[in-house]
Each structure stands twice: as C-alpha cells, then as structure tokens.
Amino acid sequence: MKVEEVFDSYDNYVMPTYTKIPLVFVKGKGSRLWDIHNKVYLDFFPGWGVGSLGHCHPKVASAVRDQAPKLIFIPNNYYNLPQAKLARELAYWSFPVKIFFCNSGAEANEAAIKFSRKFGQGRYEIITFENSFHGRTLAAITATGQKKYQEGFAPLPDGFKTVKFNDIQAVLGAITDKTVAIMLELIQGEGGINIADKDFVLSLRKICDQKNLLLIVDEVQTGIGRTGKLFCYQHYGIVPDIMTLAKALGGGLPIGALLVKKEIADILGPGTHASTFGGSPLVCRAALAVLNAIQKEKLLGNAQKMGEYLFTKLNALKGKYPLIKEVRGLGLMAGIELNIPGKEVVQRCMEKGLLINCTHDTVLRVMPALNVTKKDIDRAMAILEEGLIA
Ligand SMILES: Cc1ncc(COP(=O)(O)O)c(C=O)c1O
C-alpha cells in the first residue's frame, strides 16, 4: 500500500475518533520507530505508556512466537496455563489478591466499579477526582473528572462524585452513607502529570479503613515500572484494596487486569462478570515475558537511574527557557508544563525525529521505555531543546 492509499482507506473506512498524526509506522525496535518512508524516530511516548519495554521486545516477540502455534485462545470456562502463571506472578509482586483479566484499562476500571457496587450492597457512590482519567466506557467517563470526555453522552450513570485532587477536606465533605469507594490515579497522566501528595494518600487509606470504603488505585498508566517501582502505590507506603492495570502489562498486546484484595475478591462469583477474550493464553504469555524482562534486565533500577538523569536534563532546560513553567513526575513519567500551548513544540520535535505528547493543552509528556539509554535521552533532549525554540 502506498501512503496515500493508507490515508484514503482510513478516511473511507475507519471512524474518525482519533486526532490523527500523518505518520504511517511499519517497524519498531526498542525506542525507535520507522515510518513508511524509512525515516527513523526516537519514541519517547511509546503508546501512552504501553511500550515500557520499547517496541517489539525480543522476549515478548519470542513468547508470542512460541505460544501462537500451541494455543492462542481458550474460553474462560476452561483453565489455561499462562493465565494461571500470570495471576500467581502479579499476586507475588503486588499484594494478596485475586485477579480478573480483561482487555483494556477502561474495562478494568468498569470491573472495579461493578465490584464496588456488589461489595457495597446498596452503597454505590464512588468519589473520584478533578482532572482524572479512567477510560471511555460510560461509567469510566463518568468517573473521569474532565467534562470534555462526558459531553454529548448524557445521561451518565448515577453514583459518582468528583472532588478536588489532593484535598482531603473535599473528600470528607463528599462522603455520605451511600459512599462505597474512593478511586484515583496516584499520578494523573492525561490530567497533566499531577502527583498525589503522600499525606493525602495516607489519609485516604485511613478514611477508607475507618469507613469501610474501598481504595481503588488506577495504575493503568503508572503501573508496570513506569515510576521506577513496579506499582506506583509502592512509593506511598500504602496497600490499596483494588488496583487496575493495562497498558504496559501486555508488552503491546491488549490486556487489562482488576486486582482485588483476596479476602473480598470472591464477591464477584460465577456469572457476575466476564470478558470473552480476557486472559487468553497468548496475551498472558506476552505479559509474563514483560514481567520476566523487567526482573531479569533490572529495568526498575534503570528506570530510576534514567529517570533521575532525565529530570536533571529537563530541569536544566527549565533553567534556560522561561517558557517552561514546571517540570514534574516520577521515574520515567515526566510532565513539562509550558506557559504556551505545547502542540507546536510536539510538532517541531516530530519533524526532527522525536515523538512526545502534549496533554491538557500545555503539558508535554515524556515517557520513554524503561530500558532507555543515556545516549537516547541526550539525543531526545537535544531535539526537545530545538523544538522549544520557535
Ligand atoms: C489512568 C488511566 N486509566 C484508564 C485508561 C483507559 O485505558 P484504555 O484506553 O486501555 O481503556 C487510561 C488510558 O489512557 C489511563 O491513562
């Protein structure tokens, strides 16, 4: 297919739900992507955090190659080996949990919401936060604290209260006898890389314990090493009751997971929830390869080290360019808030061969793979600096 035919096909046959960037990619390896014209790009925003291992990691590719001829899919009313292993692995690295497997972050959050309602036995209100993002199903956009995702989709489901992030008094003021859960991202990704304060999170944990509420952490974007620990909650000295995962877990294959603390997890019994494709042998093999690579290649250590290096570089840019208002983030999840819209900076970086993202209009998002090198960070920062200069 020629590039014009690709665009033509999308124009004619694919629903226009995404703001498209006119690049057609045909190959990826680590932090590099090649487009149809063989131009190479440094990918510092691999798939909204999906590409924690970079593109086409050899361990993921070989797991898929090995599993595909054996068994790709088997329904969930049977058992399969990779799902059994993956559930055991995730429970080992997180907290005592039982897991429900699905295919995306929104689905995992939808399952968390359903779980909470079943747990609540009549209590159904969930407190969520301004600027949060939890996905695109009807319940997930209602949980999402940004009106722009909700417009045009009324009536929205009942039972969500959105309050100010990092404001414990606002949370306390929103709790009623119908409240069942508090749901948050510990670092709001789409909302502009806003970090939950440690005291705030410790207080949420205390409130949930005192009032028998579920603390749900949405680690769809922060999970699987992004912040330098396998899960972001591990920075906070708390254990959630529920955690949702997706994005990086599958190494590029679609997977979502709802992890619920073991003593209450059986509330969702047979017939109460399901997902045809959830936890298929193929995607679970890929996810096992991701977890294996993170351990064997010491990628959490690399994410911490490279994260420090990245933030040093970004702060140096901030010192040099007054248009950078703030640099914030953790591990390899970085936000650069500008005092101008970031769209043109992203465009200029792209033209020079660096892929980054802009969220919330003015926040550049940089989230390279966990195995990123100093050399690639240097290259990316040099391009970013050029991109900052109009
Ligand atoms: C924190 C968070 N939750 C949920 C989602 C939705 O995930 P998905 O697009 O896989 O449904 C996203 C996607 O960006 C996210 O960042």
Image (cartoon, rainbow, N blue to C red):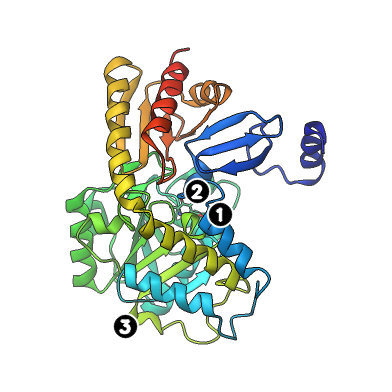
Residue 54 can be seen, yes or no:
yes
Query: CA–CA distance between discs 2 and 1?
Result: 6 Å
Residue that carries the numbered disc 2 in the rendered image: 51
Q: Under tag 2, what secondary structure?
A: loop
Residue at x-position 18% and y-position 58%: 202
Q: Where residue 352 appears, x then y in whole percent?
A: 54, 21
Residue that carries the numbered disc 3 in the rendered image: 263
Upstream in the sequence, badge 2 or badge 1?
A: 2
Tell me the mark number nearer the camera, choosing from 3 and 1. Answer: 1
Q: Quadrant of residue 385?
A: top left
Determine whether label 2 and label 1 are within 8 Å by CB: yes
Above or below for 351 versus 307: above
Determine whether label 3 and label 1 are within 8 Å by CB: no
For this view, does 22 lie left or right of residue 86? right
What kind of residue is marked 3? Glu
Residue at x-position 71% and y-position 29%: 37
Query: CA–CA distance between discs 3 and 2?
Result: 33 Å
What kind of residue is marked 1? Gly
Q: Quadrant of residue 25?
A: top right
Locate the N terminus by quadrant.
top right
Q: Where residue 124 appears, x then y in whole percent?
A: 40, 71
Q: Where residue 108 appears, x then y in whole percent?
A: 48, 65
Q: Quadrant of residue 339?
A: top left
Above or below for 304 versus 273: above
Above or below for 58 versus 367: below
Residue at x-position 28% and y-position 42%: 305
Residue that carries the numbered disc 1 in the rendered image: 252
Above or below for 338 versus 311: above
What kind of residue is marked 2? Gly
